[in-house]
Image (cartoon, rainbow, N blue to C red):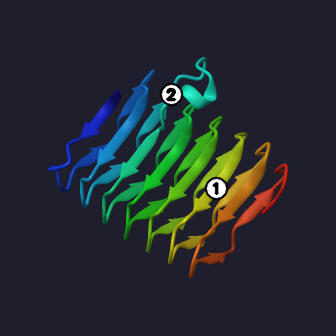
Amino acid sequence: DACVWTAPTAEEVVITDGRFTDCAFGIYVQESDRARIERNEVEGRPNVREADRGNGIHLFDASFVTVADNLVTGARDGYFVSATDDSLIEGNRAVHVRYGVHYMWSHRNVLRGNVVSDSLTGFALMQSRDLLVEGNVALRNRRVGMLVRDGEDCRYVGNRLIANGQGL
C-alpha cells in the first residue's frame, strides 16, 4: 500500500519532484540498490492514529541509496531505514511524525543536514554500525531529540537538539 513501490529487482530507480498524498506508505524502496529519492513531498494520513500510519519514505534491504531534499509530514516515521547500507540521507525535513528518521540494522550510512520538528522523536538510531550523523537538527519534539540504542562505531558531529522533551 504505497504511492510508489520499487520491486526487489529494480535498480537505479530515480524518484524526483513528486507530490504524494493520502498514502499508507509514500515511497517504499524494497531491495532496490542505487535508488535516488530527491525533492519529493510526502503527506501521510494525519487523521489516522499515528501508530497505524505508514512511513513517508521507507527503505528496506537496499544499498547505495540517496534520499535528499524531501519533505514528509503526517506519516508514522518520516524516513525509515531498515537493513540498508552505504547510503546517504541528506537535507530532508520531517514534521508531525512519530520518528523523523528511524534507523534499524543499517550500516555505513551518512545522515547529514536533516531537520525534524514538532514530532514525537527527532532521530531514532538503533542497532546500526558505522553511522556518520552530522549537522542534523531536532526541534520541539515532544519526547526526545535524538535516541541512540545499540549503535557501534558511530560518529555524532555538530548536531543541534533544541527545545525537545529530552535532548539525547
Q: Secondary structure at mark 2?
A: loop
Q: Which residue appears at 55% of the width and 65% of the height? A: 127
Q: Nearer the viewer, residue 55 or 127?
A: 127
Type of amino acid at the residue the image marks with label 1: Phe
**Which quadrant of the rendered structure holds the N terminus?**
top left
Q: Amino acid at mark 2?
A: Gly
Rendered location of residue 85, percent (x, y): 37, 67
Q: Residues within 10 Å of mark 2 (few under 14, many from 20)?
A: many
Where's residue 70, x and y in %? 46, 46
**Image side of residue 40 versus residue 103, left or right:** left
Residue bearing mark 2: 44
Q: Quadrant of residue 132?
A: bottom right
Residue shown at 76% from the left, 45% from the top: 141
Where residue 78 sits, quadrant-wise, is: top right
Structural distance between the alpha carbons of marks 2 and 1: 18 Å
Quadrant in which the C terminus appears: bottom right
Q: Is residue 144 left or right of residue 54?
A: right
Depth check: give the residue in front, 156 or 129: 129
Between 42 and 30, the residue placed more toward the observer is 30
Q: Is residue 27 above or below residue 89?
A: above
Q: Which residue is mark 1?
A: 123
- Residue drawn at the location 64% of the way across and 55% of the way down: 123
